[in-house]
Image: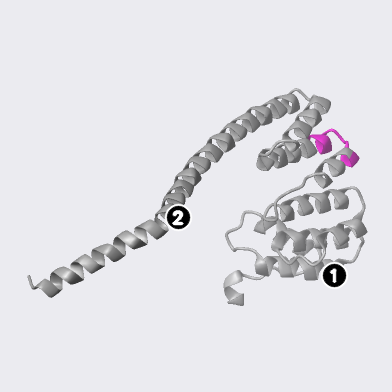
Amino acid sequence: MAIDDLLDEHEQSERVRGWLRKNGVSILAGVAIAIGGIWGWKEWQTRHSNSLAGANVQYQVVLKSLEDKDLEQAAKGVKELESGKANIYADLAALQLAKAQVDAGKNDDALATLRAIKADPEFKPVIEQRVARLLVATGKTDDAIKQLGTATDSASLEIHGDALMAQGKRDAAREQYEKALKTLDVAAPQRRLLETKLTDAGGTVTDPAESV
């Protein structure tokens, strides 16, 4: 090996040592942050898992109360879930409570339960559709249509059609049912019912293959 190469290696070595002296603290700090981040992530996972486990237990308590027809106790359980961090369990429990309230003829209570749900964006349309269906069932068709807004999914269009049918507006209802069928999967289980509604509104059911 030539002396020049040795000098180059020595110079490179000194440069590395100098760089480490200058940046060593920040490197160690970065490593510490990374380790701390990993620990924090694991700690968060543990807390989150414990929170979910607790929420699941409380959710089962609500279901038991509903099974026993104790709507007041179930409502208290829903409130407790809403004060926690596992929102999905609170939402599911509230939906179950609302259904039980409807079955018990307590439609106003059911509406209040549904409207109190603070659902995540992806879950919100389901809540709005439940509210709209209940409004139609209780004769508040204008409120139902306002609740649906400009939603264009098949379920919302179908409910809009139901509201219009309840108002005696068969032509407008038929238009909503036709739009709903166009956006509904051919194999969807609710398609048969929607086709029946379209027929009742004076429409004609066509073979999906013919419209392709």
Magenta residue span: 100-108
Q: Is residue 201 magenta?
A: no
> Which numbered disc, 1 or 2, marks the residue that appears first in the sequence?
2
Residue at the extreme top: 68
Say which quarter of the image contains residue 205.
bottom right
Q: Residues within 10 Å of mark 1 (few under 14, many from 20)?
A: some
Tag 2 residue: 26
Q: Nearer the viewer, residue 56 or 15?
A: 15
Tag 1 residue: 172
Q: Nearer the viewer, residue 111 or 11?
A: 11
Is residue 202 something that shows in the picture? Answer: no
In the image, residue 161 lies at what x, y percent?
Answer: 81, 62
Secondary structure mostly seen in the magenta stretch: helix
In the image, residue 47 lies at what x, y percent?
Answer: 58, 35
Residue 178 vs 107, above or below: the answer is: below
Q: Secondary structure at mark 1?
A: helix
Q: On the rendered image, what quadrant is the N terminus found in? A: bottom left
Q: Secondary structure at mark 2?
A: helix
In the image, residue 121 lies at what x, y percent?
Answer: 70, 55
* Residue under the image location 67 percent in, 38 percent down: 89
Q: Is residue 106 magenta?
A: yes
Badge 1 amino acid: Ala
Question: How many callouts does the rendering have?
Answer: 2
Is residue 152 something that shows in the picture? Answer: yes
In the image, residue 99 lies at what x, y percent?
Answer: 77, 39
* Residue under the image location 82 percent in, 53 percent down: 132
In the image, is 5 to the left or to the right of 189? left
